[in-house]
Amino acid sequence: MSVSNISPNTGALLGLLFVFALGFGVVFAKSAMFQFRDGKRGRGIMWLFALLTAVSSIGLATVSAALPELERHRYLVSHELTRVAALLSTVIFVVFALASLLPKLLDALERRDFVYFVGARLVRANKSGFLTVISVLSILGVSVSSCALCSVTSIMGGFGYDLKTKILGNTAHIVIDVKLPGGMADWKRAQEVVRAAVAPVGGHVTPIVGGDAMASSATNTAGTLVRGVDPETIGQVINLKKNIEVGKFDYLLDPSKLVALPSDEVVGRGPGGEPYLRGPGLRFPDLGLPPAPKKVYPGVILGRELAKSLHVMVGDELTMLSPMGELGPSGLMPRSRKFRVAGVFYSGMYEYDASHAYVLLGVAQTFFSLENRVSKLDLSIPEPEIVASVTPSVRAAVATLNIARAKHDGVHPLRVRDWKAMNKNLFSALKLEKIATFIILSIAIAVASFCIICTLLLMVTEKAKDIAVLKALGASDGAVMKIFMLEGVLIGTIGTVLGVAVALAQCLGLSWTGIRLDPDVYYIDRLPVNVDAGDYITVTVAALIICTLATIYPALTASRVRPVDGLRYE
């Protein structure tokens, strides 16, 4: 049976069986580790279950990846359970693998000098019941705090990365425009000069005519941002052509095709993503759509939310009013023009989908009375992150144009802005929010380190006689202090590595399988997760520093124990 033939229910059942089996395996392996004092048989069981979890995680991940994608608003419990089972098995595998490697690490430390030998022995030594509970809570507290901090950082980074990707896909990376209204008259020459400046890095340039308008349909009215685009170059700068989900970009070029659409043409989407067809007798015959009129109007591509607000579909008429009108008997009269919907795009940014409308460049010039002028030039480069190194060359090219333009009266200089400068406030707020979240959740690690302090203080009280014996045999105060600091650092390291590893496993799993979200509520269909190695290294270093600082006072207390006090009643 191939993976593609496995039913979702079968995959979910296998996933649940694996999870229950692994749960019993955890209990059995734990009891085995405590039952056999030599630890060899217990370690073998741990490695066995680590192998089983590895096989199960790979198998469930393969089944999860083979599951078909569902339409919007459609969920299958079996699909989600299979993905959750794959994620859980991966996390359990990480726990088993780390638990299997821990004895090896302690054995390696014991083969070093005196301080490492005693410190590692104290970590794995038999303790009193209460001290054992405190030690386990110390490890779990640090691991849970580290896992939470890494997970939240990855999810916040995922939202920021998703937002940045959508912004860069729907807006220019560099914009050249005029500060005052009126547009650019010599834009063709400027386009050639700027194109030569960005050609070495593979950049592209396109002219844009922009302005505000009021769109009115048969049932509603909404404000719009009309953008006139060049059909030959717009696809090189933004993802307009790729984002069209209903209709075709060709209808914008040839609006006569909108007069008689095919009967099987999809003209819209329902609340659940179901397609609406134009022809009668097919799906949704009760739409009551009027027959297509014979007049040909210029085409317009609307955002999904704007089309919903206006209650229009592909082929429907709408009227746009421009504030730049003509002087009439009763004053300034706004110019109106009819358009026909050529397509509906979905960019993933609600602000764009609810306001933007795209028409041809010449149509927008006539509509806004700009004649042969354009509002701005939009540039894009293959690597948006290196825009800071490309902007100076663009500024130099624009400076030569400004010198030539300065010779003409009434011509305002051009300005150059990149996407980082235009969205500086937004990304600064996201960065500040990320830093604040990191600081707040780091307090949780500090609280977890209090358990380490309690553990070491109780250890000093319980091992006072042993400390006295060590000092009587010649151990210095510094050596005793290093021993207890090493014990606390080992507890913090175990918890930190466990928490960071679990967070890495679950975040990588979430980025692969994903968690379905309601797109009408969150405007994204999956939970975005971005795993950044720098964030995980920062969390690891911060947790280790906090745990190390927590060991100083108990270690000082242990170093001050006098041999005579420890052996007085022996």
Image (cartoon, helix red, strand yellow):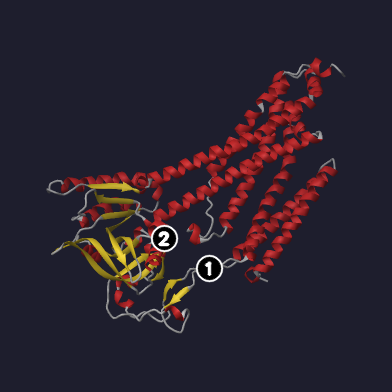
Q: How many marks?
A: 2
Horizontal side, residue 383 vs residue 5: left or right:
left
Residue 472 in view in this figure: no
Tell me the quarter of the picture where residue 147 sits: top right
Which sits earlier in the primary sequence, circle 1 or circle 2?
1
* Crowd tier of the residue under label 1, counting other residues whose Cα lies within 10 Å: few below 14, some 14–19, many 20 or above: few
- Residue bearing the label numbered 2: 347
Q: Please tell me which residue is depicted at 79% across the width and 20% down the height of the picture.
A: 468
- Residue 185 at x, y percent in the picture: 18, 56
Q: Is residue 240 above or below residue 567?
A: below
Q: Is residue 561 above or below residue 92?
A: above
Q: Secondary structure at mark 2?
A: loop
What type is the residue that disc 1 sits on? Glu
Split into 4 quadrants, where in the image is the C terminus? top right
What type is the residue that disc 2 sits on? Ser
Of residue 2 and residue 30, the one placed in the foreground of this image is: 30
- Residue bearing the label numbered 1: 71
Q: Secondary structure at mark 1?
A: loop
Of residue 547 and residue 211, the one placed in the foreground of this image is: 211
Q: Please tell me which residue is depicted at 18% across the width and 48% down the height of the picture.
A: 412
* Crowd tier of the residue under label 2, counting other residues whose Cα lies within 10 Å: few below 14, some 14–19, many 20 or above: many
Name of the residue lying farthest toward the top: 564
